[in-house]
Amino acid sequence: MKFANVKELQKDASGIISLVEKGEDVIITKRGKPAAVIYPLSEDEIEDYMIQHSPGIRKKIEEGLKDIKGGKRIPLRDLLKARKARKRA
């Protein structure tokens, strides 16, 4: 794990990203205090990251789970028909 301040990040962003690509986490500090962390993220992990960190996606998942628990379900064929209709419109 490496620490870099904002000025170092501005000066050597490419070098810091290279470290991250090699598997090292980099904590970015601002005025001596932790402000952010840069860590490796593969193409396979991007979807999981987005699901975990997107309030909009999390909200839709929670709504879907609530519907399922409440017995509200839509057959897949109906969902696909509605999707096709939206694309035509």
Image (cartoon, grey):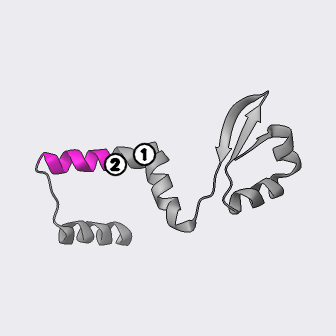
Report x, y in % for residue 6: 81, 38
Q: Is residue 26 left or right of residue 61?
A: right
- Residue wearing tag 2: 60
View extreme (right): residue: 11
Residue marked by disc 1: 56
Q: Are marks 2 and 1 in contact (CB under 8 Å)?
A: yes
In the rendered structure, does residue 68 fall within the stretch colored magenta?
yes
Measuring 10% from the left and 50% from the top, which residue is drawn there?
71
Instruction: Provide residue 86's location: percent of width, then percent of height.
Output: 34, 66
Q: Which residues are magenta?
A: 60-70
Tell me what residue is drawn at x 73 percent, y 40 percent.
28
Would you say 12 lies left or right of 26 here? right
Query: Which residue does the image show at 13% across and 45% down from the upper left?
Result: 70
Q: Residue furthest front?
A: 1
Front residue of 41/68: it is: 41
Q: Which amino acid, by three-letter code, is at mark 1?
A: Gly
Taking the spot 19% from the left edge, 72% from the top edge, the residue there is: 77
